[in-house]
Amino acid sequence: MSHTPFIWAAYSIGAVVLLWCAVAPLAKRKSIATNIRRLIQIEERSRDSDS
Amino acid sequence: MNKNTEIKAKPRKNAVVMFIHKMGSPPWFYDFTGKFIPWFWLIFGALTVWGLYLGLVKAPADYLQGESFRIMYIHVPAAWMSMLIYSTMAVLGFIALVWRIRIVEILAMSSAPIGAAFTIVTLTAGSLWGRPTWGTYWVWDARLTSELVLLFLYLGVIGLYNSIDEPRKAARAACLLAIVGAVNLPIIHYSVKWWNTLHQGSSISLLGGSSIDTSMLWPLLIIAIATKFYYAANLLTRARVSLLEQDMRKAWVREVLKEKN
């Protein structure tokens, strides 16, 4: 039995899982930053209309 | 000088205590930890490349298991991390429950997805190692089952934290579950001694000698150290993102985003 496919599969799955785990918070940070910027714009607009 | 009017020098706080106090401040924590994250990723990358080169290219094949032993370089460090992260999460959970420190709650909760990822890697790599070695992908032996229970505990902590809207209440409930679940850690560790398992016993001991040749042991230790840096970098990244999310309406978050633009 060739062991190569098992080794490749183990490392590939490991790389995908750990890469996803590292990238996920960065994607979340981007969406949070967008939300906060939108919130600031809404607040500024409402402040302008009040004044 | 009158005893009552005597001016006493203000006692100076210990540097460590001062540091811990500063770490409790979200803007300070965000700024301070942000400086270390790129270095942690860099060290992780360098150690991983070095360790994998030694383990996959330089180390000789095992006399009994052949090439399949090379799965050890991902399976074993991941297994160690799955337990280490759970222990860290339980300790942080205890501190968070006793002293009610928000940053510690966030750190405990940010540990759970990283621990779950390492547990998934442990189980899949172990399963893929088991097929050529034992002739089966899975068997319900004590070590494998207790590691699977660890994954369920991580998923339970993540699920409980996300099911409650108020983040601090959610963290407290999830921290309690993390502490209770810590009972599984000695079961995982001693399962190969307490029960007759298909999974082999420990080949590496901190106190006794290791039964692995040094040419195979060094790459394992290098990758094991690399995974600690992965955890540190990922944990701090997640904690910073959680802080931004929770403090969305606070001035310091807006300052941070303005500086980035």
Image (cartoon, helix red, strand yellow):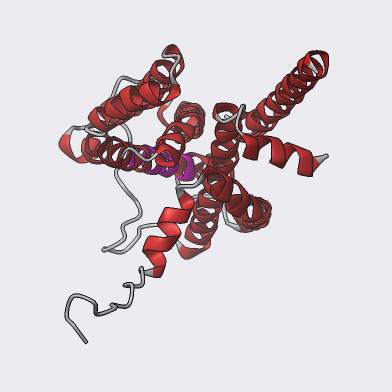
Q: Quick check: B211 above or below A47?
A: below
- Camera-nearest residue between A31 and A4: A31
Q: Quick check: B99 above or below B59?
A: above
Can residue B54 be seen by looking at this rendering? yes
Residue B60: name its quadrant: bottom right
- Quarter in which the N terminus of chain B is drawn: bottom left
**Which residue is at 29% across, 42% downward?**
B99
Q: Which residues are magenta?
A: B77-87
Q: Is residue B243 left or right of residue B87?
A: right
Q: Quick check: B77 above or below B53?
A: above
Q: Is residue B55 left or right of residue A33?
A: left
- Camera-nearest residue between B118 and B123: B118
Residue A4: name its quadrant: top right
Q: Position of residue B201 (x, y in %)?
A: 29, 43
Q: Is residue B32 left or right of residue B16?
A: right
Residue B51 part of the magenta-drawn span:
no
Can residue A8 be seen by looking at this rendering? no
Q: Position of residue B11 (x, y in %)?
A: 31, 72
